[in-house]
Amino acid sequence: MGRRPDRRRGRLRPRGARRPRRHGRRRPGDLSDPAAPAALVATAADALGGRLDILVANHALSGSDGTLDRIDAAMLDAHWAVDTRSVLLLVQAYARHRAALPRAPPAGA
């Protein structure tokens, strides 16, 4: 049986083999809205059965930049809201979610 590249991982997998199931889910959200980060964490946790084990904040506002001469306070505020504030609010919501979960027994116990 031949092998073909698994482009996501750069590995070979047998022909006909199914791709691994994705656990991550894409959800749209306007991260300039201060309520969006908590809603995204809640939606992700619900979609995964109530438990969210990892948070990846890989987003940024782009496409609305200007030259140094043209950028203004509103543009900078938009970047702050999406690139910085939303990350802190995502981490806060994730930490609150994790704190509310039952504690797991120590490894080996």
Image (tube, rainbow, N blue to C red):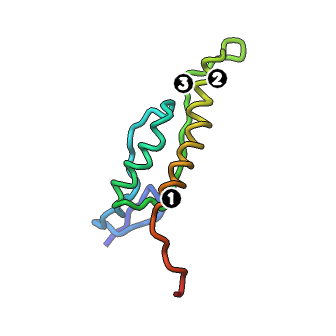
Q: Could you tell me which secondary element the residue under label 1 belongs to?
A: loop
Give the mark, 2 or 3, whose residue is nearer the N terminus. Answer: 3
As drawn, 29 above or below 70? below
**Direction from residue 75 to residue 9 in the image, left or right:** left
Q: Residue at x 50, y 60 (%)?
A: 98
> Mark 2, mark 3: which one is toward the viewer?
2
How far across and down, in percent of the image, does residue 40 sit?
Answer: 42, 44
Asked whether the residues under the numbered discs 1 and 3 touch, taking CB atoms below 8 Å apart as contact, a structural biologist would say no
**Direction from residue 26 to residue 93 in the image, left or right:** right
Label 1 belongs to which residue?
54
Q: Residue at x 55, y 28 (%)?
A: 62
Q: Amino acid at mark 3?
A: Gly
Q: Which mark is residue 63?
A: 3
Q: How many C-alpha atoms fall within 10 Å of the one at disc 3: few (<14), some, or many (≥20)? A: few
Q: Is residue 106 visible?
A: yes
Quadrant in which the N terminus is drawn: bottom left
How far across and down, in percent of the image, does residue 10 sit?
Answer: 49, 60
Asked whether the residues under the numbered discs 2 and 1 touch, taking CB atoms below 8 Å apart as contact, a structural biologist would say no
Give the mark, 1 or 3, whose residue is nearer the N terminus. Answer: 1
The quadrant holding residue 36 is top left
Q: Amino acid at mark 2?
A: Leu
Label 2 belongs to which residue?
76
57 vs 51, nearest the viewer: 51
Q: Amino acid at mark 1?
A: Ile
How far across and down, in percent of the image, does residue 89 sit?
Answer: 55, 42
7 vs 57, nearest the viewer: 57
